[in-house]
Image: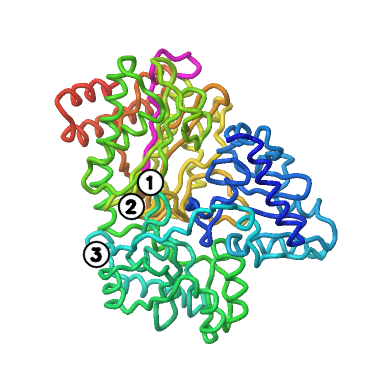
Amino acid sequence: MERYEIQARLGALRAVMEKEGMDFCLIPTADFHGSEYVGGYFKAREYFSGFTGSAGTLLVWRDGAGLWTDGRYFVQAQRELEGTGITLFRSAEEGVPDIPAFLEEHMEEKQTLGFDGRVLTAKEGEKLARLLAPKQIVFATEKDPAGEAWPERPPLAAGPVRVLNKTLSGMETEEKQKLVREALKKQHATALLLTGLDEVMWLLNVRGEDIACNPVALSYGYLNENALYFFVQKGALGEEVSSYLSKHGILVRAYEEIGSFLEKETKKDKVLLDMGRCSYSLWQKVKAGAAALVEGKSPVEALKAVKNPVELANMEKIYLKDSAAVTKFLYWVKKNLGHEKMTEMSVARHLEDLRREIPEYLDLSFPTIAAYGANAAMMHYEASADSNAEIKPEGMLLVDSGGQYAGGTTDVTRTIVLGELPAEIKRQYTAVAAGMLRLWKARFLYGCSGRNLDILARGPLWKMGIDYKCGTGHGIGYILNVHEGPQSVRWRFAGGVEEAVLEEGMVLSDEPGVYIAGSHGIRIENVLAVKKDIKNESGQFMRFETLTYVPVDLDGIDVSCLEEEDRKALNAYHALVREKISPFLTEEERAWLKEATRAI
């Protein structure tokens, strides 16, 4: 995109700000539900900044603009913001203020801060109100300045909703509602406002298609002692799902009625809402209408994170099929490299085609990251027509991908060695593999969170003086968002972030990496399920079981840098890969797999 075009868009936005009396305008990467990924209607931050990463916040004022994003996107953001006049603020880096601190320093008394109250969370809005109160800052939250300045804005997505039957869900919605109501009592609440799309889908046993790669429908849920309400867009419900909702006593209301409902029909309810996911606007309406407001974590998040036996069994089957597709892809790259033209975009398409051959395939779980050479240093790189690199028999290709299936959500990364590597890069590659294996092989006492275990994956790299600016692992949804909480693996927890105990049935990723700007990136990712191990006088021990069975490229391994336990773990893992994946392969592919997973 031409830089002058971004400057023109910012000019149009500033004209709206002046008309509405706004001195500063805040545009997060968000929809009305706090979703990680958003549909085209909500990509205002991307439209006005040109930054295409999935996380970031734009702040615009009369003579400047800033873009805040995290370490996954520093390299990408710096490149995409060049020439736009927008300053990059590297979040969490030393000396870099966050947005509230920046506004506290730069806004003058009685100035006006504008933002769409439907897309900023209650937690963020309340923090801003508290910090800016001494300066008597005025909030303008009923307008959508970005929308006013955005001609030909894409329409709000409104795809069909479909039912998830019990062979996939493992539990009826009534069973789930009972668990949620029991949890609400413990939190001294009688009702729950559900704003997270994945939580609404999980509780009702339905799915949608309003966000690419995320099988969710734009909707709200409201559960009290007597009923479950489903606020959804007109036209999204066909005959089958309408019949299902009626059969299970779920009351349907129009999507846009949620605000008036909260103001007028919650007067007897003590409503629990999650300040980190509920919008600032709906928080205000609950405060105005409900008998009481209870701030806390939605119990659905923790319930959803622990997969039931049916869900786990389905995931195990799907991960085998998905792993076989990725293994076939690795074989195809190795066999055809140098014989046919390959680009980042063409290899991503080939991998998607292999996944489409799986009968249960629904969609990708996120846009495939196929990053060659220096592009792999950008953690969430996505090839475009401008950046689409040709892949040559040298260096490395990082491919991070996943699928949505009727049976599970997958996520896997492999870094493929395409030619001879310098000794230092092989040492880094070996350390990444060792870190991934050490987390997989962990045995730990019940009560540990991911913070207790992060050093196992990060340790080999820290020993080399290398770190990666992201967590080691995240929760994985079930036919839902590829990223979910509350579980995660990371060493640093920001204030207010929950450290969730790792429960049996949780599923999470294991993905250490190395990212050297301008040179290369390495990531190796498996997905693990939390299982119970032995129980003795010391307590209940836990372990991980891998769901992913894809070879680690031995061409990147320097055996002399592997400790004996790491070497044994790699050989054991590869023996499992051969056993589990060989039945899905052709004779030629099996011969290649045998060599690719040979004992070292």
Q: Can you identify the residue that label 2 sits on?
A: 532
Q: In the rendered structure, which amino acid carries the disc numbered 3? A: Lys
Q: Say whether disc 2 or disc 3 marks the residue closer to the N-terminus.
A: 3
Q: Which residues are magenta?
A: 411-426
Q: Amino acid at mark 1?
A: Ser
Q: Position of residue 570 (x, y in %)?
A: 33, 28
Q: Nearer the viewer, residue 455 or 69?
A: 69
In the picture provided, is 388 more to the left or to the right than 334?
A: right
Left or right side of 142 for 107: right
Question: x%, y% of residue 282?
Answer: 57, 70
Tell me the crowding category of disc 2: few under 14, some 14 to 19, or many 20 or more residues within 10 angstroms, Cα based.
Answer: some
355 or 386, nearer to the observer: 386
Which of the marked residues, 1 or 3, is nearer the chain's N terminus?
3
Residue 365 shows which numbered tag? Answer: 1
Give the residue at mark 3.
166
Per the model, the C-alpha gap separating discs 1 and 2 is: 28 Å
Q: Nearer the viewer, mark 1 or mark 2?
A: 1
